[in-house]
Amino acid sequence: MSDHAAPPTGAGFDLTEPRTRFIAAFGLVALIVVVAIVLGLQAYVNHVTEQQVFKRVLEPVSEDLRALRAREDEKLNTYSYIDREKGTVRLPITRAMELLSQEHAQGAAQ
C-alpha cells in the first residue's frame, strides 16, 4: 500500500498533505542563495570602489602634472618682465603681499 491515499473520486480538490520537509528545504536553499548573492555583490562593489579611490586619489602623480606645478611655482616665486617696453614686471607672490600690506598700513596711518 502507498503512504499517500488517492483522493476519492469526484471530490474536486486534492486531499494529500503538503510535503513540509521539501518546502522547508527549498526555502532554506533559496535563503542561502539570496544571502550568497548579496554578499557577492557587496564584495564586488567594495572592490570596484577601492579601485576608483586608488585611481583618483592614491595613484602616483603624473609627470605632466609635476611639470605643470613646477611652471606654476616658478611663476609665483620669481621676478620676470611681463612687458619690457611698458616696464611691467612680475613679482614673487610673497613680495607682492608684503608691498600690499605696507601700502595698506600707510593708507590707514594717513
Image (cartoon, rainbow, N blue to C red):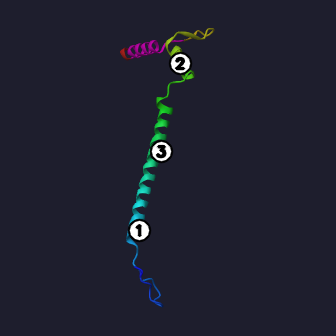
- The mark lying in front, picked from 3 and 1, is 1
Placement of 76 over or under 10, stated as above or below:
above
How far apart are the alpha carbons under marks 3 and 2?
Answer: 41 Å
Q: Which residue is most to the right?
A: 85
Q: Residue at x 48, y 33 (%)?
A: 54
Element type where label 2 sits in the image: helix
- The mark lying in front, picked from 3 and 2, is 3
Placement of 62 over or under 9, stated as above or below:
above
Q: Can you give x and y, in whole percent of width and height, for residue 75 in the image?
A: 53, 15
Q: Residues within 10 Å of mark 3 (few under 14, many from 20)?
A: few
How far apart are the alpha carbons under marks 3 and 1?
Answer: 33 Å
Element type where label 3 sits in the image: helix
Amino acid marked by disc 1: Phe
Amino acid marked by disc 3: Tyr
Q: Which residue is most to the left?
A: 109
**Along the line of sight, which residue is nearer the eye, 104 or 53?**
53
Q: Which residue is mark 1?
A: 22
Q: Which residues are magenta?
A: 90-107
Q: Which residue is mark 3?
A: 44
Q: Can you give x and y, in whole percent of width and height, for residue 21 in the image?
A: 38, 69
Amino acid marked by disc 2: Glu
Q: Residue at x 44, y 45 (%)?
A: 43
